[in-house]
Amino acid sequence: MRIARFSYGDPDVAGYAFGAIGGSPGAEEVAVINGHPFGEVTFSGLRLPLAGVRLLPPVLPSKVVAIGKNYADHAREMGGEAPAEPVLFLKPSTSVIGPGAAISYPKLSTHVDFEGELAVVIGRLCREVPVERVPEVILGYTCANDVTARDLQKSDGQWARAKGFDTFCPLGPWIDTDVDPSDLAITTTVNGDVKQNARTSLLLHDVVKLVAFVSDAMTLLPGDVILTGTPAGVGPIVPGDEVAVTIEGIGTLTNTVVGSVGSRSGESR
């Protein structure tokens, strides 16, 4: 099942719903879910054309737990060795945006990078999950972009500010609950040019290990997100760029980059 979070109707009226996407290509519909998708899913009976709704971030997580240097080739391109255990850092919930939303280039940075990743969406409250029970706590998977102010990451000596700007965690376009995450193609393009091209089978620590590892440290809530790490090929983006992260079996997350007032990023390409 592909589960989307979306708004529809009057754009001036706040509100959203979850729905399951179905139908033939070019004529997809969204079957509206009663309430939320965490638990038994029931439907309202209302169906809407996918083309007539606005896709939002598929979840509003209480936290985004991200993993650093989880592909050996990315660890090397960043000038280091792959860590023996997963390296965790947090991105604030305020960094999350959805498909089609703009990544805002912060005025405090002159070097912002894209990082395409597979994201895990947690489906139930859990803590200290045994490896063999990890599939029970996963709702599904989506695409992510761990946007990073690389210059601030280097100057700060830690990653909170560099990874935590508003709009620095695009997620979407929806959650796929059936995909097998063990060997999926992941591709990132900038303005149509391929920058990253890898497979999730190259993850140093796979999804099952990551969820168990993170849950040993902190309680995970329904809708929380774990970013599994980015492969090699990360690079800069500037205002005017379009970044697309495509994951086999899930879909494509596309966002444009815009400049903030007073941005020091220079001219758009």
Image (spheres, rainbow, N blue to C red):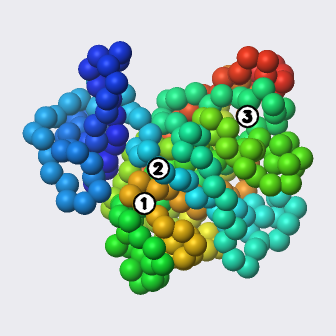
Kind of residue sitting beneath label 1: Leu
Element on which disc 3 rests: strand
Is residue 202 visible to us here? Answer: no
Residue 237 image label: 3
Q: In the rendered image, which quarter is residue 168 located in?
A: top right
Q: Nearer the viewer, mark 1 or mark 3?
A: 1
Q: State if disc 1 and disc 2 touch (CB < 8 Å).
A: yes
Q: Is residue 87 above or below residue 266?
A: below
For residue 55, side relative to residue 78 (left or right): left
Which residue, given by chain and number where applicable, does mark 1 sit on?
Answer: 221
Q: Residues within 10 Å of mark 3 (few under 14, many from 20)?
A: many
Element on which disc 1 rests: loop
Element on which disc 2 rests: loop
Reading the chain from its start, which is encountered first: label 2 or label 1?
A: 2
Reading the chain from its start, which is encountered first: label 1 or label 3?
A: 1
Q: Residue at x 52, y 36 (%)?
A: 97
Whole-angstrom CA distance, mark 2 to mark 1, is: 8 Å
Residue 61 image label: 2
- x and y, in percent, of residue 59 in the image: 41, 46
Which of 44 and 156 lies nearest the eye of the viewer? 156
- x and y, in percent, of residue 211 in the image: 51, 71
Whole-angstrom CA distance, mark 1 to mark 3, is: 32 Å
Q: State if disc 3 and disc 1 touch (CB < 8 Å).
A: no
Q: In the rendered image, which quarter is residue 162 located in?
A: top right
Q: Is residue 168 above or below residue 3?
A: above
